Image (cartoon, helix red, strand yellow):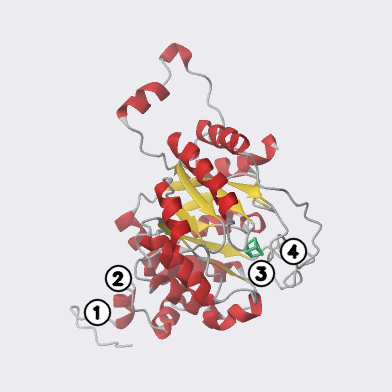
Amino acid sequence: MSNQNNGQTLTSLEKLNSGQVRHDWTLAEVEAIYNQPFNDLLFAAQNIHRQHFNPNQIQTSTLLSIKTGACPEDCAYCPQSGHYNTGLSKEQLMAVEEVVTKAQQAKKNGATRFCMGAAWRSPREKDLDVVLEMVRQVKDMGLETCVTLGMLTDEQAQKLAEAGLDYYNHNLDTSPEYYQQIITTRTYKNRLDTLQHVRDAGINVCSGGIIGMGEETNDRYGLLQQLANMPEHPQSVPINMLVAVEGTPLGEVEKLDSIEFVRMIATARIMMPQSYVRLSAGREDMNQETQTLCYLAGANSIFYGEKLLTTANPEAEADMQLFKRLGIQPERREMDQEELIQETPKVEEQQPAKPLFYDATKTH
Ligand code: SF4
């Protein structure tokens, strides 16, 4: 690092913190960002965040598990894997009508994006046809759509794009080096290939990872390097804290220091300045102060609802109260004028304020 600074020459660290959109990060650079003094890290991340986003708005997505459990993959953290006995009850693929009803409720309560997750290695063609119909109908409601279905072929990605899919979620999970400790049933390259098919089809990429799985800090740098060095940064980057589920191989892993988690969020924000950084699974283990630090570090998206696929999510009410205390507004989706007129009740029809969000657990 250069310490030569005559007032005009930037030090190396200042350059790294500058918020330049890059795709050629080295591990040493990621390490330098991640390990700088905490206050400097947060200051840099918040500065960059403000250049691209309203710092007082958080995007909220509702997540619905449309097919649960019995997955043939062996992801060591996942209670949905058929390889582990976690007591999770399995559910078949839901009917289109049922999913549409839940999406309607989500929209009514303020969600901007509806995410549908299925525990598959990859979708079978007949199942994909059902999901395509779900995407079409949810999209027609004016909601953004996102699905996570496992590995995709090029053709499957094209079909999803034609159905109007906005985002496809497929996480890298960890660094290429640590990956074999976590999953043996598919390769890192399989994951990168699926993401390439998604990008080629013109669908936005949602891809991130999980920390607190017993990895070294080097693996965290490696994960961020992989994400940020993609040809385009993923539009959405979920950063998950491991939820250690009894019965999975990671059920007993020691809990991660929350300051490390905040460092991860801030480093993601600095390296991928224009992406939504999502505070994802593991929020229920964080106190409100840690979540607040994550927002300060540039997290600007959350899953809302008590169920995040199969793990608990903080009480919906607690989220709203925290937003209120922090002066944060949930991001509204852009509506066209006609939709706005239809949606805005006349003064005499206006009801007392309702909860802003959809709580998936109340409708099961
Ligand atoms: S993370 Fe996804 S692919 Fe892996 S076991 Fe769970 S549901 Fe299956």
Residues packed near mark 2 inside 10 Å, few (<14), some (14 to 19) or many (20 plus):
some
- Give the amino acid at mark 4: Gly
Badge 4 is on which residue?
82
What residue lies at 72% left-to-right and 48% top-to-bottom?
Answer: 91
Q: Nearer the viewer, mark 1 or mark 4?
A: 4
Q: Which mark is residue 342?
A: none
Q: Which mark is residue 18?
A: 2
From the top left corner, tell me how far across and down residue 229 is, in percent.
38, 74
What residue lies at 63% left-to-right and 47% top-to-bottom?
Answer: 66
CA distance separating discs 1 and 4: 53 Å
Secondary structure beneath label 2: loop
From the top left corner, tell me how far across and down residue 214 is, in percent.
65, 77
Badge 1 is on which residue?
10
- Give the amino acid at mark 3: Cys
CB atoms of marks 1 and 2 within 8 Å: yes
Quadrant containing the C terminus is top right
Between residue 342 and residue 40, name the one nearer to us: 342
CA distance separating discs 3 and 4: 10 Å
- Vertical placement of residue 329 versus 294, above or below: above
Does label 4 point to a residue whose CB lies under 8 Å from ligand 1? yes
- Give the amino acid at mark 1: Leu
From the top left corner, tell me how far across and down residue 314 is, in percent.
64, 49
